[in-house]
Amino acid sequence: MTLRPMLAALLRVPALACLLGAVAAAAAQPTTMDPRVARGEQVLLELNRGRPQPAFEAMRKEFPFLADATAGYALGDVWGRKELDVRTRQLAAMAAFASLGLRPFFKIHAGYALDAGVSPQELKEIDYLITVPAGFPRAIEASQALQELFRERGIAPEAPEPGTR
């Protein structure tokens, strides 16, 4: 039996015809995005100045559920809150990621901090600060991420302040 006669035979069974009709109707309906996910994606677009975020886009391709969960909760529910300004939120995130040794996340958020008006010297101060709770190895790793970011952005190293090395 070829495919066409087989489908015709299946459609004569009322329950199957009803099920296939429901599936076809559902497939024809446009899908609506969860408002939390939409809000999270808007936050991400704002952080990236309208550009796609490569790490997030890669996650969306390979792990769509994780991308939606991240957009809905982390970005939409948490990062979308208005109690902290973007600058403060980025500085806090940098300190947390550096302390945890999450260099890629630290670097991404340091870039967002620069975009939010944080100076390179302020970023360095966050690095110095994390030596206390996280130790020198984590601070050194964060300093290497900052050096990479500064090079990528064309930010020249600043001369040390008088009285410091």
Image (tube, grey):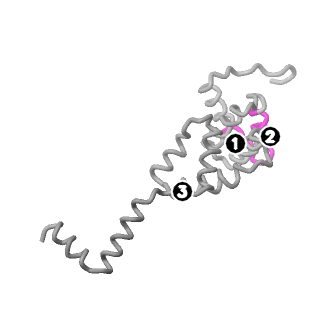
Question: For this rendering, which residue is in front, 12 or 110?
Answer: 12
Label at residue 66: 3
Residue 120, percent across and down?
Answer: 73, 28
At x 56%, y 35%, the residue is: 51
Q: CA distance from mark 1 to mark 2?
A: 13 Å
Image vertical order of residue 104 relative to residue 3, above or below: above
Mark 1, residue position: 137
Q: Earlier in the sequence, mark 1 or mark 3?
A: 3
Kindly report which numbered mark, 1 or 2, lies closer to the viewer in this rendering: 2
Task: Give, as a three-letter code, the residue at label 3.
Answer: Leu
User: Is 80 left, or right, of 160 in this rendering?
Assistant: left
Is the residue marked by circle 2 packed among few (<14), some (14-19), or many (20+) residues within 10 Å? some
Is the residue marked by circle 1 packed among few (<14), some (14-19), or many (20+) residues within 10 Å? few
User: Is 32 left, or right, of 7 in this rendering?
Assistant: right
Q: Secondary structure at mark 2?
A: helix
Q: CA distance from mark 1 to mark 3?
A: 30 Å
Mark 2, residue position: 129
Residue 138 magenta-highlighted: yes
- Magenta span of residues: 123-142
Kindly report which numbered mark, 2 or 3, lies closer to the viewer in this rendering: 3
For the image, the number of numbered tags is: 3
- Is residue 130 visible to the viewer in this orientation of the structure? no
Q: Secondary structure at mark 3?
A: helix
